[in-house]
Image (cartoon, rainbow, N blue to C red):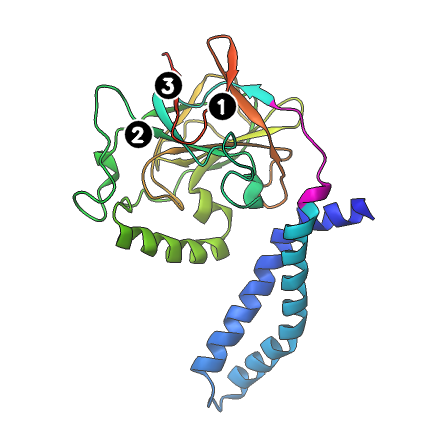
Amino acid sequence: MTRVILSLYRVRGVLYYPAAAVLVLLALSAALFRDAQTPVVRAAVAVLAGLALPAVVVGVLCVLLSVLAPRLLPERERMTVVPPVRGRWLAVNSPATKVPSHGVRAWGQAYAIDLVSEPTDGARPAFGEGPAMRPPADYPAFGAPVFAMIDGTVVRRVDGMRDHRSRSSMLAFVYMMIEGMLRELGGARFILGNHVVIRGESGVCAVVAHLQRGSVAVRVGDRVRAGDVIARCGNSGNTSEPHVHAQLMDRASVWTGQGVPMAFAVDGSAEMPADGEHLVVAG
């Protein structure tokens, strides 16, 4: 029974988003085409109405799985990897502070971390000061090199998503929250933006995300070594300012992958900074 529950839990995203799309489309059609007389429109609305109950059942099942199934997940050993950045970076949404680090286990990000550049010789624009939506180039992270965390083979790359402006005021942040709900319906590329997935020999996959458009220097099938430059930091996807999102998963698909605990190899030790702490990597 446990195996069945965990199997359903793994594909909950694949089940949930089509169900959510059906309910959203049904709500929109009810509002926009309430008095429609066109046979085609009426038939389409009738089909959506017929799918409503199954969609609700699937949605409830996915919610229950998200709440209950994590208790059944097996413990995984922490894996030490090469940091994806160099210099001084602030930890945000760190698994050293809480798990799941980003509040959810979806997209394989239970143990993910966000790293924001805060160099000692350069200022990072403060939240709430200046324009509500700054150009990404105003931030020291934008354009910084991003490194492969493990040896392995590139199994996925996305490089065409635009780098949007920052969300650097409370009003802009609220806008990002609303925008984020719509991005969820679009799938991984709208959440992670430009990203690279590398599969290691053990099957564990390393992901770096929110990369600069046009900067991804590897292609699917390329072999890379830990420490190779594979892209540059950007502001693509669901992000408030340029930063590097890093995570490990037990398979290549962010739809079905489960997060794997990780630490960064720094000066001979394994480190994972907590929220508000800095990861400092020479080089």
Residue 272: which disc? Answer: 1
- The image quarter containing residue 163 is top left
Mark closer to the chain start, 3 or 2: 3
The residue tagged 3 is 86
Q: Residue at x 68, y 53 (%)?
A: 65
Nearest the eye: 202 or 279: 279
Tell me if 10 is positioned left or right of 245 in this view. right
Mark closer to the chain start, 1 or 2: 2
Queried whether the magenta region covers residue 76, the answer comes back as yes
Q: Secondary structure at mark 2?
A: loop
Q: Which residues are magenta?
A: 70-78
- Residue 145 visible in the picture: yes
In the rendering, at what x and y percent does residue 136 appear? 26, 38
Q: Amino acid at mark 2?
A: Ala
In the rendering, at what x and y percent does residue 4 appear? 79, 49
> Viewer-nearest of labels 1 and 2?
1
Q: How many marks?
A: 3
Mark closer to the chain start, 3 or 1: 3
Determine whether 103 is above or below 86 in the image. Answer: below
Queried whether the magenta region covers residue 273, the answer comes back as no
- The image quarter containing residue 93 is top left
Cα gap from disc 3 to disc 2, whole angstroms: 11 Å
The residue tagged 2 is 141
How many residues crowd around disc 2 within 10 Å: few (fewer than 14), some, or many (20 or more)?
many
Cα gap from disc 1 to disc 2, whole angstroms: 19 Å
Q: Secondary structure at mark 1?
A: loop
Q: Residue at x 50, y 46 (%)?
A: 188
Q: Amino acid at mark 3?
A: Arg
- Whether tag 3 and tag 1 are in contact, CB under 8 A, the answer is no
Residue 131: which disc? Answer: none
Q: Secondary structure at mark 3?
A: loop
- Magenta stretch, main secondary structure class: loop
